Structures are given as C-alpha cells and as structure tokens.
Amino acid sequence: MQVNNVETLFQKTLQDSGLTAKQQAVLSVSLNLFAAQGFDRTSTSEIAKAAGVSEGTVFKQFKTKEGILSAIIDPVLDHVIPMAATEFMTEIDAAKITDFEGFLAYVIEDRITFALENQQQIKVFAQEIIRQPELIQTLLDKVQGLVTSKVGDIFRKFQAKGQLVDWPVERVARYIVGTVISYVLPQILFQLDANFDVKKASHNAAQFLARGLAPEK
Amino acid sequence: MQVNNVETLFQKTLQDSGLTAKQQAVLSVSLNLFAAQGFDRTSTSEIAKAAGVSEGTVFKQFKTKEGILSAIIDPVLDHVIPMAATEFMTEIDAAKITDFEGFLAYVIEDRITFALENQQQIKVFAQEIIRQPELIQTLLDKVQGLVTSKVGDIFRKFQAKGQLVDWPVERVARYIVGTVISYVLPQILFQLDANFDVKKASHNAAQFLARGLAPEK
Amino acid sequence: MQVNNVETLFQKTLQDSGLTAKQQAVLSVSLNLFAAQGFDRTSTSEIAKAAGVSEGTVFKQFKTKEGILSAIIDPVLDHVIPMAATEFMTEIDAAKITDFEGFLAYVIEDRITFALENQQQIKVFAQEIIRQPELIQTLLDKVQGLVTSKVGDIFRKFQAKGQLVDWPVERVARYIVGTVISYVLPQILFQLDANFDVKKASHNAAQFLARGLAPEK
Amino acid sequence: MQVNNVETLFQKTLQDSGLTAKQQAVLSVSLNLFAAQGFDRTSTSEIAKAAGVSEGTVFKQFKTKEGILSAIIDPVLDHVIPMAATEFMTEIDAAKITDFEGFLAYVIEDRITFALENQQQIKVFAQEIIRQPELIQTLLDKVQGLVTSKVGDIFRKFQAKGQLVDWPVERVARYIVGTVISYVLPQILFQLDANFDVKKASHNAAQFLARGLAPEK
DNA sequence: GATGAATGAGTCTTCATTCAT
DNA sequence: CATGAATGAAGACTCATTCAT
C-alpha cells in the first residue's frame, strides 16, 4: 500500500533547495517548534538556539520570521500537496476496486496514515489557517482542480454502477471528509487515543459512509 | 423552535458578575479582538484603547492578560455550556419525535444555530484548545456526564424501535458530530458560504446520517 | 531600671494625634512593612490590604506614600527621641554613680535595651538614612544640643575624678558608640545571636571601654 | 604600604570577564547609580541612558535587573574579598611588627584606606545586606575560614608577648571592628568629614584599642 | 555564509494617586 | 470619613531585526 510521507518529500525539498545544512536545521527546528507551541509563542532566538546557529543566521536566509513560516508552508502548498494528490490520484485504480466500500476503506486508510505521518506540518498549517483564512482558499484552489475532475469521474463511475447515491460531488465529499476528520483531528491535535487503530478506524468509517452514501432503494 | 443564545447568557453572566460597565467593556472587546486576531496578536493596550479605558483598568480586575482569557472562557466552561446542555437535553422530548431522521434534523439545526450565534466564543475557544489540549478534556468532563446518559437513553430508544443501527454510543455520536462539524467549522472559521442555509444543511445532514445509521437489513 | 519604649510612646503619639483607628492602623502596618521589606518594596495597596482599609483611605490622611514615611519618622525625630533623650539624661544621676565603668554599664544596657525594643523604627530609620544622608544631620541637630552639654558635664566630672582619659568629648563618645553598635547592629539587622545576653554584653562592653578610656598612667 | 584597591581588581575582573565595552559600561554605570540612589530607585532605562547603550543591551547580557546587581556583588564576594583577605593576611608579617599598637595602626589604616577606595561597592553591598541579611552569612563564610586561624595566631602571639588581654578572639575582633566602623561608616555613607585624616584616625583608633585591649595589670 | 552584539519599539504589568459616590 | 474603580506614567523585560566583523 502506498504511504505518502510528506516529511520525506519536505526534506527532499530541503536538500534540493540549495540551502546550507544550517538553514535546513533552522527550517526543521522551526517546524517542530511552531507545531509544538505555535508560531507566535516561538521566538527567533529560541529557533536559533535549538538549531545550533546564531541569531543572525536565522534571518540571513529567510529575512523575517514570517519568511520561515512561508518557507515551511509554501513548499507544502506548492509541491508537496499537489505531488501527493497527483500520486494519490494516479495510484487509485478505480477499475480494480469495484466495491465502493472497499474503495473508501483504501482511501481513508491512506489519508489517515498520511495525516498521522505529517502531524507537525498539519498542526502548523491548522494554526496558520485560523489566522489566515484565505490560506484555505489557496489550498482549495491548488487541490480542487487537480482532484475534482478525477474524483468526480470516480464518483460518477460508482454512481453508474449503482453503488453511490446520486448526490452532487461536493455533498458526497463533505461527508467523507467530515467523517475522516472526526477520526483524525482529535488524534492530531490532542493525542487522546494512545493506541489508535488506523485499520479498524478506516474500516468502520468506510462501513458507515458506504451505508450513508448507498443509492436510494 | 428553541434557539440557545450563548451570547445572551454570557452577557447575563456579565451583568450578574458584579463587573462595572468598563470591565464588561474590556471583556466584550477582548472577546471580539481575540476571536478576530488571536490572543497572542492582541495587545493589552489595544484592548484598553478599544474598550475606551486605561490600561491600568484592564489589569485592575483581571490581573493578567491570561486572566482576561479565563474570564471569557471559564464562564463558558462553567455555566454556559452546562446550562446549554441541560436546556438542550430537557427540551428533547424523544417521545414526541418518533422519527430518527426528524430527531437528527431537529438536533442538528439547533446545534448549528447555536454554533453560528456564538462564533466568537467558539473561535476563541478553538484557538485556545490548540494551545491547551487539556482544555478539551475539561470540556468533555463537563459535558459528558450530563449528556452521555441521556443521549444513550435516546439512542437506545431508537435502537429498540429499529431506527438506529446497533453500534456503540460513541461511534454513533462520532459520525453525527463529524458530519455537523463538516458544515459548521468552515462556516465559523472562514465565512466561505455567505448565504448559508441552516435549514437545508440540517436536513441534508440528517438525511445522510439517518441512512448511514439505519439498522442493518 | 528604666526602660524606654519608643513603641509605647509612638502609639501614645498616635492616640494623641487625633487620627482615626483606620489611620492609625495604616501607620502601624506601614511601620512593620517598611521595616520588613523596605519602603520601596512596599506598595500602598499592600499597606491598605494589611491595614484592612481601602486604598483611598491610605491617601486621605497622608497625601503621599512619602507622607506615611514622614508620619512615622517625624514624630520619632520630633518627640520620641528628644523625649527619650531628656528622660535618659534626667535619670542619669552621675553623682550616684561614682564609678565610670558602672556608669558605662548602666548606660550601655539601657541603650541596648532601648534599641532592641525598637528594632522596627530603627530599621526603617536606618534604611531611610542611607537614602537621605541629610537625615542624620537632622537627627544629630536634635540630639546634640540636648545631649552634648549634659554628656560633656558628665565626662568632665569623670575626668576630674581621674577615671576618664583627657580626650575631646567627641572622641570618647565615638568609641562608646562604636562599641555599642558592634553589639547592637548585627542583632537588629540580622538576628544572628538568638540568645543574646544584654546584661553580659553591656558588662563586657563597659569593661573594655573603661580600660580603653582610663586616664594615662 | 600595601593599599588594596578593589576598584582596580574589579575592573580587571571586568576585562577578564569577556564582556564587551558596552556591557562593562553598563556594570560600571550601574555600580555608581546603585551606590548613589539605591537599587530600587534606579531604573533600567536610566542605566541604559547613562551607559550610552540601548535598553535591550542591558538585558541581553544580564537577563534581569537583579542580574546586574549580582554581576556587581558576586565577583566581590567570590574574588575580590577573598583575594584582598589573602593579600592582606600574607602581607602581615607579625614577626616584624612587635608592637601591638603599631600592628593595629597598620592594619586599621590599611582597612580604612581599602574601604574609602571602594566606597561604591561597599555602599551597594550595605544596601543589599539590609534587604538580604543572609548575604552577611555568605560573606562571613567566605572570609572567616581564611582569616580566623591567621588572626587567631597573631592574637595569640601578642597575648604570649603580654601585649594583648586574654580574651576570646571574637571579643577582641569585635571591638577592633566596631571602632574602625565608627570611623569608616559615617565617612562612607554620609561624607560628613570633608577633610578626613586617615593617618590620624588610624593612630587614634589604634591608641584607644591598644589601651582597651592591654593585658590586665 | 555565519556570527552575535546591539538595537529600540513594543509588551505586560505595577503602582501611586485621584475622585465620584 | 471612607470607599474602590479608574487612571496613566513608568517599570522591567522581550523580541524581531540589523550590521560590522
């Protein structure tokens, strides 16, 4: 099964970025600190100390503190998410998965795993989105075009097969996303459930969704 | 239909609090500023200026900036939410609503309305929860005891009537909450949908949930 | 033996002052707080709270914080010390004490006792003197005229009797004062010696001084 | 004659401290301001302005205002005083000074000179001791071990020679210290005597002490 | 490129003092 | 007289940012 790992991709981005080791340390450390205590509660001197560099170095490359945040968020927005989406879409071979519930189980497990593996970035992103609601539009713009048509195709295929209710794509997507989030968000923001079972959660969610999205009798 | 309005309750709390008009202004202004730009990005001098009081006045009553936050959040935690939950529970007369989907539609509309009317507090709360994950446990503790048994009773009644699948209460609740959130959260955090139709949203959500939570054939 | 108790005198001053009970509480509490933690480190709100009065009351009578200090120090300067000095001088009956060492022992014990009984005022005074060196001149002016002639007379009497070296009054006084202080100051500022024996200390000091101030052979 | 100059030692400590010129200016200026107007009455902005640096610079190095005080007091406690004591002890060659009064005159002049040359530090120290009585214990601990045995030896030598009364070391030391203080303290805290004659004062003090501490006939 | 000392605007907070009730 | 809410100037301290080395 495919497991997207944004961290790896992000780090590869780092290496390809031409940044020195110290600058990469700054970014890496900033990601963790921002995720753990928030952007506003993380000082640049804290970053410098944690990264083992001077305070000047932090600004040499990124100009401002916001610049560090951008350097973390932008590549996610520009490359990681699109790339992940593309890979994801490519890999989905709807033809092979004829069963809608099976499709859901696959997708959900994949996305939950993805999310859990990238808690840090998601946390930073989530915090930033609260402060900059326009970010979500940017995100939607990036992903939507890419995903919509493909997802729409898939949904239509399942609808044609009589496995999916005849609702608009957005509505169907909303319930899927909402259900996945009800599992993922508590897990990411607060580690409530220490022994969280991704497999079981995905199966349960898929089961519920398949029923709720089954076509009218 | 009953519409809980936390704002009214909160302001009543204010009036009963023995706070002077100026102190209430501080709290009121702080709520709006914290919601709009976040706790960390709101300075006490900004609050003082917006409330039309001196900076000393802000601290005379609330001791610290965190104290203001507590004065906003604590009553919500201590009174508003329990009170709202009680009222809500009391009002639900499961006997009258024999139809599960009707029950859901009622509950969902009520809660969406509640949430939309209290965007500010919820936003402040949401931001604070990210920084203080233990808050959610406090919240759960407050509400759970109150809600669980009653909700459990209702669910069991619908299960007995053959309108609700025989899943654990938590699982059923999770899907309901997740679905509601998928409507409410975007609306609160980013005013994406200018002309959001609560009635229609509630109906749709209830429809989907009733199908997903229908008993096995 | 005569024991001057400035505290009693001070409190009598208070009662005669026409101050209300609350105002007296303010002064009394201020004395203790100033002695314990210093003038600068004691806030007026702290005084108000400790005295059980409102913040306004503190200023009603004494106008400023410095005013409180003055209300504590001035009577000491204006009445207590002169009165104590007068009493002291009056009581000394040099004629009866023909022995210089006996005279010293008497005086020293009396003054040490006096000092220990009035640690608070002395501490406040000491702290204030460091900040306002001119205070000591005021103090000297008050006491000197009163004491000098009398002390001078006594010294001259002992010199005439061949029990006291023929040095200027100031020089003799300096050694006496210095020696007494070497016993008293550590005791007042830091309670070093828990079981301090005034009687023995006085006797020792007198013995030493009598030898050092004995006339040349 | 040996003249300890703490100021020089302190400044050497500064130079060895690796502090920049600006930081040294902060310390130097703070010493003078603290001595002149007290720690509590000196604001950090005042220090910054007087030192010709920004307020941030003051805190960059010393973290807190108390940190500045520590940076002034600690080296005195840790290095200057022990060093001065050692030098002092080393230099005393009791063998050469067979006369107890001569010994006293030497010692007293040396210490008075030392004190007068370091008025500032002593004033700051004195003020701080009133607020932190435990400091004196620290000071005693530092010096006592160093001094006691040596001083004890010297005293015993003079006692053996029949030049010093057979009293406990502490008692003898107390009178010497008390007498010296009676000359030094007024001079340091209030510049009462503009043309103070160290030589004469030392001689007088030594003369008095030698008589008071002469062995019993 | 990296350093870290220096900056100064800005933050939270305290406190002596005033004044309407 | 007494109260205590309100004030605002000042205080200690932080922090993003700059720049000479």
Image (tube, coloured by chain):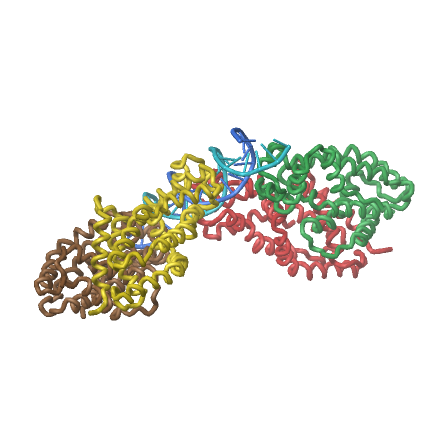
Chain colours: A brown, B yellow, C green, D red, E blue, F cyan
Residue C129: image quadrant is: top right
Q: Which one is in front, D132 or A80?
A: A80
Task: From the top left corner, tell me how far across and down residue A40 is, in percent.
Answer: 35, 50
Q: Which one is in front, B79 or C109?
A: B79
Task: From the top left corner, tell me how far across and down residue A76 is, in percent.
Answer: 22, 56
Picture layout, residue D135 above or below residue B56: below
Residue C47: image quadrant is: top right
Which residue is at a point 39% across and 41% down the rendered structure image? Answer: B28
Q: Which one is in front, D14 or A98?
A: A98
With B156 as the anchor, is C46 left or right in this view?
right
Residue C114: image quadrant is: top right
Which residue is at a point 22% across and 63% down the rendered structure image? Answer: B212
Q: Is residue A61 visible?
A: no
Task: From the top left corner, tell me how far across and down residue B170 is, in percent.
Answer: 32, 64
Q: How many marks?
A: 0
Classify the position of the C terminus of chain D by image quarter.
Answer: bottom right
Q: Is residue D115 visible?
A: yes
Q: Which one is in front, D67 or C26?
A: C26
Task: From the top left corner, tell me how far across and down residue B98 is, in percent.
Answer: 27, 59
With B139 as the anchor, is B19 left or right in this view?
right
With B203 as the anchor, is B129 left or right in this view?
right
* Most distant residue in the front direction: B96
